[in-house]
Image (cartoon, helix red, strand yellow):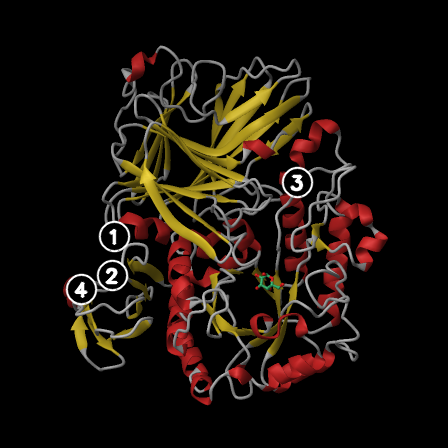
């Protein structure tokens, strides 16, 4: 079945996935009308479907890409200022093209797909008065139910234009009554908590204006039918493949139409287009699910695994790591790290990651960022002895860097004080006593590339944790003209992408993990270059339930790095059992954030068992289907499940946060099994059919303590 069909007689495009239809139509007056998005409806003639809408006297009708100044007073998708300072825009259809596969665009992360995986529609609109064209690209992923959208603006006039706003995607949805809008919000050490609220007249939006996608709001929103659950009900998801400033908005107008828009945050953006120039937005991924929130998430997880850069490598293996940060902090030196390594004797850990503190003159967070050479006082013989020791103990060596930063106290700052982002006449605002390098400048990108490349080619480094620990302030650069300062934040992130592209492709054997003060840049943009991200600086198993549950709304389990930390946990004072910390983490990209030598013999002895369990379910983490079962945002329990592609195996994690007096037994209804097949619970040997486990549920023992977890491994007979 063709996934994109154009019916000439009605000038209608049908974009069809396995479980959704998206319809747009060229109106008689050339306006591109949004006709429908939702469950499959075939290819009806919907020519006059919206003829009655609000009298249709002006542009307050469903549109695919709304403008400003011509009657549509909802949030515009695009605002272009002409040389005479006006912003009256109107886009009419010019032409369209059907393209096999998915055309690549330069300089930004994106889903990559060949002709057998996807098909693309490009609709070209033009503003003939102002002299610019807009291409709307729609790539349809049939199996995953995802439509990837992006927008390109081209100045075809003889005069400069300024783009003040340009959405990656917008959809006008009519007839959706009683919907809620979901967002993932938080802060450092409590990232991506789920929030929903009713869609009411007015605008709801989440944004980032900090130069990164941010702790505060993920670049994601979903419209969720009231009463929808994890497994049932209609959901429209929208996520950006972008790591910079974003705005995700949902607007309900006076007639209850809903406009969902996603793109770069217009508050911190403008872009000058000289004659002949073009600008491309980041990509937005739309999905419609009639299988509730899990249906949405599974579509996102699947496109991430199959088409998103480094995440899509078929032979991707996420190593089990142990990291020095929470136990050794800035105190890393040859002696301490050697002891840390020796403490791992006999443990089946793949990589020892030496975190912050190894370079320049770094003893705390006040110095040396930018000086990516070994601290000779701490490592007088260089890094080779600790690398050799790692190998001797059966591990590879990994390292922490924060390439985008510069400390005032650093050799780099002495040499290039003008390389930090700053505003003339103002002392740059510092956060964590550090400043950010101006990666809009090619020579700064080249420097960082060279210094990190030297490090990675000098030593046998298997793993890099790429951190980014502050926001962008003092936005602007003297290397851009006055009329281009509004381009700074986007140019910064383009510089980051260029750097990541160059470094990760020059060192394909190195495994890269993204990080930004925990999870402040957890997005599909970073995941294109680095197949996992440090989910949060919070390793408290109980807090992690919400963080990982919320993150899984969009991102697959393998993308989330999750480690067992020490107790009592520094951020909460909470003491959870070692097993509980392991159970919560081992369904993700797994590791330890502690010194194995500080553990009791009893806990230490549990490590290899946890790692073995992680390896048993690893294929499901990477290639299986993830289901959220019980939400820690709604229940004292939390449960999730992995199912292998062939439905022959499953892993279930159930957690109870606090003990209840005189509790009821819980039966957790599983998902995704084959109803007739019998599954054995490996711990007890009991067998049940898939139907029993899905409909009657898995009986979960009553716990009489706070902070309890159980995991269940199921194997089909
Ligand atoms: C950030 C990271 C931590 C650790 C420290 C080191 O906070 O999220 O995991 O690497 O930096 O300074």
Residue at 74 percent across and 42 percent down: it is 422
Q: Give the quadrant of residue 688.
A: bottom left
Residue contact at pointers 2 and 4, CB within 8 angstroms: no
The residue under label 1 is 231
Disc 2 and disc 3: Cα gap in Å? 44 Å
- Mark 1 burial class by Cα count in 10 Å: few <14, some 14-19, many 20+: some
Disc 4 and disc 3: Cα gap in Å? 52 Å
Residue contact at pointers 2 and 1, CB within 8 angstroms: yes
The residue under label 3 is 491
- Mark 4 burial class by Cα count in 10 Å: few <14, some 14-19, many 20+: some
Marks 2, 4: nearer the viewer: 2
Look at the image and tell me whether residue 132 can be seen: yes
The numbered mark at residue 671 is 2
Residue contact at pointers 4 and 3, CB within 8 angstroms: no
The residue under label 4 is 675
Q: Earlier in the sequence, mark 1 or mark 3?
A: 1
Q: Quadrant of ligand 1?
A: bottom right
Residue at 73 percent across and 66 percent down: it is 362
Mark 4 vs ligand 1: CB below 8 Å? no
Q: Give the quadrant of residue 270.
A: top right
Helix, strand or loop at label 1? It is loop
Residue at the farthest right position: 415
Compare residues 86 and 295 and report the one nearer the observer: 86
Helix, strand or loop at label 3? It is helix
Compare residues 475 and 220 and report the one nearer the observer: 475
Disc 1 and disc 3: Cα gap in Å? 40 Å
Q: Position of residue 412 (x, y in %)?
A: 80, 56
- Mark 3 burial class by Cα count in 10 Å: few <14, some 14-19, many 20+: many
């Amino acid at each position: 079945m063709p996934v994109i069909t154009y019916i000439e007689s009605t000038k209608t495009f049908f974009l069809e996935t396995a479980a959704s239809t998206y319809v747009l139509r060229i109106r008689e007056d050339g306006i591109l009308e949004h006709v429908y998005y939702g469950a499959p409806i075939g290819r009806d003639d919907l020519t006059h479907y919206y003829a009655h809408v609000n009298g249709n006297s002006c542009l307050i009708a469903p549109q695919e890409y709304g403008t400003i100044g011509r009657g549509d007073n909802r949030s515009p998708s695009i605002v272009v200022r002409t040389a005479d300072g006006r912003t009256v825009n109107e886009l009419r259809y010019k032409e369209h093209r059907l393209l096999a596969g998915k055309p690549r665009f330069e300089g930004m992360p994106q889903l990559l797909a060949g002709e057998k995986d996807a098909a693309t529609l490009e609709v070209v609109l033009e503003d003939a008065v102002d002299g610019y064209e807009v291409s709307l690209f729609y790539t349809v992923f049939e199996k995953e139910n995802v439509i990837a959208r992006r927008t390109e603006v081209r100045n075809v006039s003889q005069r400069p234009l300024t783009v003040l706003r340009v959405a990656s995607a917008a959809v006008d949805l009519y007839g959706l009554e009683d919907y809620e809008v979901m967002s993932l919000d938080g802060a450092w050490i409590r990232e991506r908590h789920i929030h929903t609220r009713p869609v009411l007249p007015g605008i709801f939006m989440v944004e980032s204006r900090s130069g990164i996608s941010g702790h505060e709001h993920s670049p994601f929103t979903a419209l969720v039918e009231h009463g929808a659950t994890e497994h049932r009900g209609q959901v429209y998801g929208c996520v950006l493949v972008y790591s910079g400033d974003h705005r995700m908005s949902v607007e309900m107008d006076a007639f209850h139409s809903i406009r969902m828009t996603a793109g770069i945050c217009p508050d911190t953006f403008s872009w000058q287009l000289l004659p002949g120039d073009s600008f491309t937005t980041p990509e937005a991924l739309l999905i419609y699910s009639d299988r509730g929130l899990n249906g949405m998430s599974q579509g996102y997880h699947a496109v991430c695994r199959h088409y998103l850069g480094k995440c899509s490598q078929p032979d991707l293996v996420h190593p089990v790591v142990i990291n020095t940060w929470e136990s050794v902090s800035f105190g890393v030196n040859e002696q301490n790290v050697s002891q840390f390594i020796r403490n791992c004797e006999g443990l089946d850990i793949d990589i020892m990651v030496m975190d912050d503190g190894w370079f320049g003159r770094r003893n705390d967070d006040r110095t040396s960022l930018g000086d990516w050479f070994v601290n000779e006082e701490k490592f007088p013989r260089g890094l080779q002895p600790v690398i050799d020791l790692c190998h001797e103990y059966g591990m590879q060596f990994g390292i922490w860097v924060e390439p985008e930063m510069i400390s005032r106290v650093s050799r780099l700052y002495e040499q290039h004080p003008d390389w930090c982002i700053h505003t003339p006449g103002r002392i740059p605002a510092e956060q964590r006593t550090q400043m950010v390098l101006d990666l809009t400048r090619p020579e700064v990108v080249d420097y960082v590339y060279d210094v990190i490349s030297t490090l990675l080619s000098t030593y046998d480094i298997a793993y890099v944790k790429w951190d980014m620990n502050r926001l962008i302030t003092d936005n602007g650069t003297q290397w851009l003209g006055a009329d281009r300062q509004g381009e700074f934040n986007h140019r910064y992130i383009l510089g980051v992408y260029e750097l990541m592209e160059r470094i990760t492709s020059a060192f394909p054997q190195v495994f890269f993990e993204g990080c930004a003060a925990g999870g402040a840049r957890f997005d599909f943009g970073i995941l294109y270059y680095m197949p996992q991200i440090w989910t949060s600086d919070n390793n408290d198993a109980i807090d992690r339930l919400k963080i990982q549950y919320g993150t899984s709304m969009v991102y697959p389990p393998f993308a989330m790095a999750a480690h067992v930390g020490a107790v009592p946990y520094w951020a909460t004072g909470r003491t959870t059992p070692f097993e509980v910390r392991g159970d919560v983490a081992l369904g993700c990209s797994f590791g330890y954030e502690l010194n194995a030598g500080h553990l009791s013999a009893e806990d230490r002895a549990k490590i290899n068992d946890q790692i073995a369990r992680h390896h048993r379910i690893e294929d499901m983490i990477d290639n299986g289907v993830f289901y959220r079962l019980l939400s820690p945002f709604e229940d004292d329990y939390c449960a999730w499940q992995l199912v292998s592609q062939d439905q022959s195996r499953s892993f279930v994690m159930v957690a109870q946060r606090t003990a209840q007096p005189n509790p009821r037994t819980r039966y957790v209804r599983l998902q995704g099994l084959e109803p007739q097949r019998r599954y054995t619970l490996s711990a007890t040997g009991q067998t049940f059919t898939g139907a029993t486990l899905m409909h009657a549920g898995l009986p979960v023992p009553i716990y009489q303590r706070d902070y309890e977890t159980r995991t269940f491994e199921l194997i089909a007979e």
